[in-house]
Amino acid sequence: MNTSVAPGEDRNIVLALGAGGARGLAQIGVIEVLQERGLHIRAIAGTSCGALVGGACAAGKLAELTRWMQMTSRAEMLRLLDPGFGRPAMFTGDRLVKELREVVGEPRIEDLPIDFTAVAVDLLRQREVWLRRGDLWDAIRASFAIPGIFTPMVIGDMELVDGGLLAPLPITATRLAGPHRVVAIDIHSQPQSLAEDPVRELAAESGKAAPGILGRWMEKHFGDDEEDEPKHHFKLMEVMSRALDTMQERIARVQLALEPPELLIRIPRDACEFYEFWRASELIDLGRREAEKALDAAGF
């Protein structure tokens, strides 16, 4: 398919922003490059971290989210994970969402300047759900509720979890915006070697993990403990990360085959672990590089 855009042609696009944990922050860099190239974002559909980035963009607050992400250290990020004692997940997500509301604001989806859809999954009915009205943060919170990590989000009679379970790359949801070019960002692309991809270098640690029993537990499972495990290759978070990646990569491949976008921008799946949100600056730079390459190749 010829995706080149001649001078004077319609430069409107819609974005399909994918799931993939912290790798989704690379989509900030992609959006920055798209806008610098003079492409106009008319609608966004996002899943999980794609819903977080897409919601902030649709609200006109992407710069504010970017600054907050870049300034938040690993220790500070871990302190925002409030334990979900007695609930069906490790964390409630309440403290994190409260902080993000202060950064981005509290608009309703129907009032956003850019059409926005957050994709989640209703556990009760086992189906994909497109959230297009109501509180922006309720929708985003539902979309990134990774089962076992964050408690499900209850909206009406639905119990909602991470949209990446069924739609890690929500191309179908973008079709509601009309016949614009679809730009999809696949966060499950082929891995790059450590030597080729500098973003794989671990970020310097800033501060210590939260004190106390919870802090020590999070440091053990989210940290860089160098103790050898004689029987297992991966720690808890690494097991969950690889399991999610395996599932989402396969579903995303099917989605791309069924509904190929006009432009596909690929982010390597080994860019970081899904929980490493404190590496925002590296990931945004990676997104910018991959976007530049894809746009140059496609003639956008």
Image (cartoon, rainbow, N blue to C red):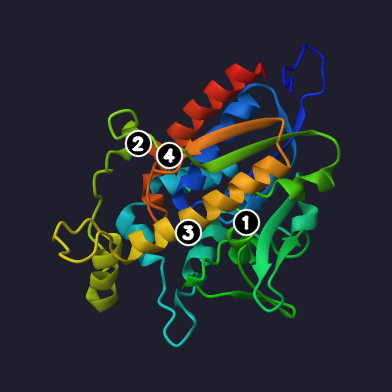
* SS for dot 3: helix
Residue 244 is labelled as 3
The percent position of residue 101, horizontal first and vertical second, equals 57, 60
Give 6 or 211, whichever is nearer the viewer.
6
Question: Which numbered disc covers residue 105?
Answer: 1
Q: Is 271 rendered above or below residue 146?
A: above
**In the rendered image, which quarter contains the N terminus?**
top right
Q: Nearer the viewer, mark 3 or mark 2?
A: 3
Q: Residues within 10 Å of mark 3 (few under 14, many from 20)?
A: some
User: In the rendering, at what x and y percent does residue 8 appear?
Assistant: 82, 14
Cα–Cα gap, marks 3 and 4: 19 Å
Q: Is residue 297 left or right of residue 93?
A: right
Measure the C-alpha gap from mark 1 to mark 2.
30 Å
Count of residue discs: 4
Q: Amino acid at mark 3?
A: Leu
Q: Are marks 4 and 2 in contact (CB under 8 Å)?
A: yes
| Image vertical order of residue 221 relative to residue 6, above or below | below
Q: Disc 4 or 2, which lies upstream in sequence?
A: 2
36 left or right, relative to 272 = right
Q: Residue 201, how many percent across, how many down?
A: 27, 38
Which residue corresponds to the image point at 62% horizontal and 66% vertical from the top-left? Answer: 142
Foreground mark, 3 or 1?
A: 3
